[in-house]
Amino acid sequence: MTGTSLRRGATTFTFVAPALLGIAIFFVYPLLSAIYFSFTEFDLLSVPQWVGLDNYRRMGGDPFLLQAIRNTLWMVVVFVPIRILGAIGLSMLLVQLKRGAGFFRTIFYLPALVPPVAATIAFVYLLKPGTGPVNHFLEMIGIDGPLWFNSPAWAKPSLVLLGLWGIGDLMIIFLAAVLGVPESLYEAASLDGANAWHKFRSITLPTIRPVILFAAVTGVIYTLQYFDQAAVAGSIASGQATVGAGISQAFGYPEGSTFTYPLWLYTVGFRYSALGYANALAIVLFLVALSVTVILLRRAKAFSGEES
C-alpha cells in the first residue's frame, strides 16, 4: 500500500473508531459475557461454576417458562398484527380528512408520548371492574363489562387495548408512507374505474410494503421483550404496586395470564439469583428474535420477487 492509501485508511478508521468502540463495549462484550455465563452457575456473589448445557436442559422442565412462552407467543400473534392494521387504518382515515387533519394527527399521536408505566396505571384504573368509568359507561348502555385486568381471559386483550391506545408512533410512520404514494397512480386507477378498495389493495399496499415489513420486524422484537406494561398491570390490578421497590409478588396476575418471557427471565435473575439460568434464557430470546427477523426479511424478499 502507498503512503496515500495508508493515510486514507487511517483517516477512515479515525472516523469510525468511536462507533466501533461503542459497539464493542456495549454490544459485543455484553453478548459474549452472556453466552459465557449461560454455561455457568452464577449468582453475583460467588465465582461462576461451569455447568455446561445444564441451564439449557433445565428449560425443558420449567413449567413457568412454558407458560411465559405461551403468553408471549399470544402477544406476538395477536398484538403485532392488530397494531399494524390499526396504524394503517388510522393513517388512511387521516389522509381522507379535508379539515382538521393536523388537529386529529396531534390528538392521535399524543398518547404515544405518555410514559408506558403511567399509561398502564391509568388504564388499569379506567378498566377497574367495580369503580372504573369504562364499566360504568357500559352499564349505562346495558352491557355488563368484563373484569379486564382482573380476568385471566381478558388480561391480555386489555394489554392489546393499551397498545392500540398508544398507536400514534406507528401511525405517524404509516401516515408518512401513505402520503408518499404518488397521486398519479391513484388518478390512473380512477380513470380505469378502480374503486377505493382496489386502489388500496393494488397501489397503497404494494407501495408501503417496506414500511409494513419494518413495523412487523420491530413489532415482533418489541413484543418478545414485553415487560413494563405486563409487570405494572399485574401488580396494580392485584393491589400490590411494588414494582418500583423491587420484584412484585404479583407478576403474571391474574393466574399467570400476563406472565411474559422477559418477566420470568427477570424473576429468575433477580428474585432467585440464578443469573446463569437467566443468561441462558436471554441468549435463547436473542436467538429467537434474530431468527424471526431473518425469516421475515427472507419471506418479504420472496413475496416481492427480489433475489437474496
Image (spheres, helix red, strand yellow):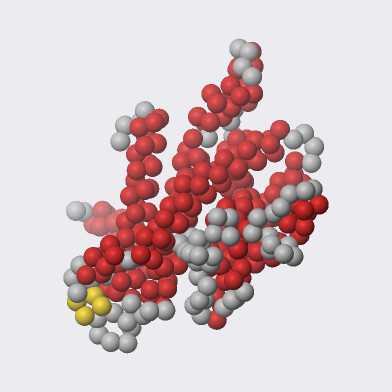
- Given residues 165 and 20, the one toward you in this image is 165
Q: Is residue 93 left or right of residue 283?
A: right
Give the residue at x 58% y 21%: 198
Q: How far across and how far down the image is residue 207, in percent?
A: 52, 31
- Residue pictured at 79% horizontal, 41% vertical: 100
At horizontal 36% and vertical 80% (from top left) the residue drawn is: 273
On screen, residue 282 versus residue 52, left or right, reads right
Which residue occupies the foreground of this view, 258 or 38?
A: 258
Residue 128 placed where, x, y %?
68, 63
Using the image as rendered, state which of residue 157 and residue 40 is in the foreground. 157
Residue 294 appearing in the image? yes
| Looking at the image, residue 250 lies above or below residue 291 | below
Question: Taking 222 as reference, is 286 left or right?
Answer: left
Q: Position of residue 194 (x, y in %)?
A: 61, 17
Residue in the foreground of this view, choosing between 167 and 154: 154
Residue at the extreme bottom of the image, as rendered: 45
Residue at x 51% of width, y 43% of height: 81
Where 276 sits versus 172, above or below? below
Residue 34 visible in image: no
How many labels, in total? 0
- In screen coordinates, is 259 left or right of 121? left
- Quarter of the C terminus within the rendering: top left
Q: Residue 212: x and y, percent?
A: 50, 40
Quarter-of-image position of residue 264: bottom left
Up the image or down, 292 lies above or below 60; here it is above
